[in-house]
Amino acid sequence: MKKWEREYNAHVRALEKGTIKGFEGLQNADVEEIDALKEMEKAKKEIQEREEKKAVTKGADGGPVAPKMNISVRSLLRLAVASAPTDYHIGKQDERCGALAASALDVA
């Protein structure tokens, strides 16, 4: 027998004996009534306020404002060449790649 089955059976037996109570006292308990229409109107108002706050942070076209980033290939290649290690042995493959990078710097 599994643990949940033992706990369930013990709970059912306790309800049958009357040692614990189920929903018997629910009618006498302090129960709060909720009006669904009022809650729905309240939620609509909160959503509208949230959308208004979002509209303040967006651009004129309705989308988020993108940062102006002008990135060119030339600047990326300069950064790559400047940060490349210079203390390693250059083979033929590396020489061709270096020539391509250097020619891209001249062209771009």
Image: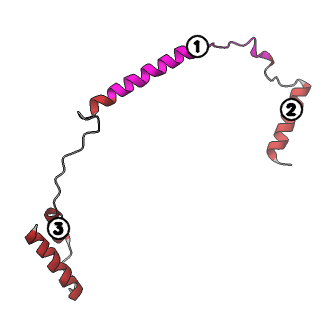
Counting from the top left corner in percent of width and height, residue 71 is at: 17, 57
The range drawn in magenta is: 25-53
In-image side of 102 versus 66 (left or right)? left
Q: Nearer the viewer, residue 101 or 13?
A: 101
- Specify the amino acid type for callout 2: Val
Per the image, the residue denoted by label 3 is 77
Q: Height in image: 26 above or below 8?
A: above
> Is the stretch drawn in magenta largely helix, strand or loop?
helix
Identify the disc placed on residue 35: 1
Q: Height in image: 66 above or below 55?
A: below
Q: Nearer the viewer, residue 28 or 44?
A: 44
In-image side of 27 versus 6 (left or right)? left
* Residue at screen point 86% across, 32% down: 12
Marks 3 and 2, the one that precedes in the sequence: 2
In-image side of 4 versus 17 (left or right)? left
Q: Given the current orientation, which residue lies at the most extreme front position?
A: 61
Marks 3 and 1, the one that precedes in the sequence: 1
Q: Is residue 91 visible?
A: no
Per the image, the residue denoted by label 2 is 12
Q: Given the current orientation, which residue lies at the most extreme bottom position?
A: 92
Question: Residues at badges 2 and 1 in contact (C-beta under 8 Å)?
Answer: no
Question: What SS does tag 2 mark?
Answer: helix
- Specify the amino acid type for callout 1: Asp
- Specify the amino acid type for callout 3: Leu
Q: Is residue 107 visible?
A: yes
